[in-house]
Image (cartoon, rainbow, N blue to C red):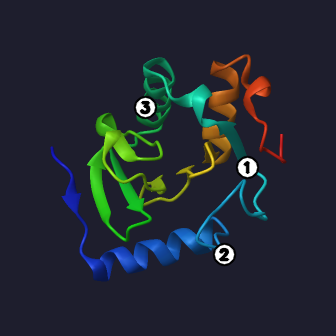
Amino acid sequence: MPKVIIPEEVSSHLRKDMERVWDIRQPYWYPLFDCSREDLISFDSEYIESGEKLNNIITLLTHHEVEQVIELLETGETFNIQVSNLYPYYGYNGDLPGREGFWTSHKMDWIIYASHEGTIAFGGEWLVKGLKLLWSDWGNHTAWDTKN
């Protein structure tokens, strides 16, 4: 299934819900700005940007029955994508120009944020815990993180 554009009216509600649930008070999010939630971790993007890590992320999401992902880009565009097409990196899949983005689901019990500063943040207790279990060296790649 290709990307499906989410209409502006629906997108606006999704963004507001995401901002409320995940304490997003600025155009940029954790770790660039503080967040009251504790179930977060931020990695250096170079650590995350590999096929193996991407497969780990998709597998964790799939095991938690995530099939559809909401992709909210800083350009204002919002898409519905299959979890298998997830590519949560700054500059999305080589598109120009680079852009920040958020990825979540309608349940909003997890989130991913790719920033322009070379960080990728993950939120949601089960997602953070799962990533730490999978990546034994995770602590060496959290230069911007203030919660772990």
Mark 2 touching mark 3, by CB under 8 A? Answer: no
Q: Nearer the viewer, mark 2 or mark 1?
A: 2
65 lies left or right of 113: left
Quarter of the image holding residue 4? bottom left
Residue in the image at 79% along x and 37% along y:
143
- Residue 125 rendering spot, x and y as whole percentages: 68, 45
Check the image and report above or below for 5 versus 10.
above
Mark 3 residue type: Ile
Instruction: Name the residue that disc number 1 marks.
Output: 39
Mark 2 residue type: Arg
Instruction: Name the residue that disc number 3 marks.
Output: 58
The disc, 2 or 1, on the residue closer to the chain's N-terminal end is 2
Instruction: Name the residue that disc number 2 marks.
Output: 25
Q: Tag 3's secondary structure? A: helix
Q: Tag 1's secondary structure? A: loop
Residue in the image at 39% along x and 39% along y:
87
Q: Nearer the viewer, mark 2 or mark 3?
A: 2
Mark 1 residue type: Asp
- Residue 147 rendering spot, x and y as whole percentages: 83, 47
Gap in angstroms between the C-alphas marked 3 and 1 = 19 Å
How packed mark 3 is, by other alpha carbons closer than 10 Å (few <14, some 14-19, many 20 or more), is some
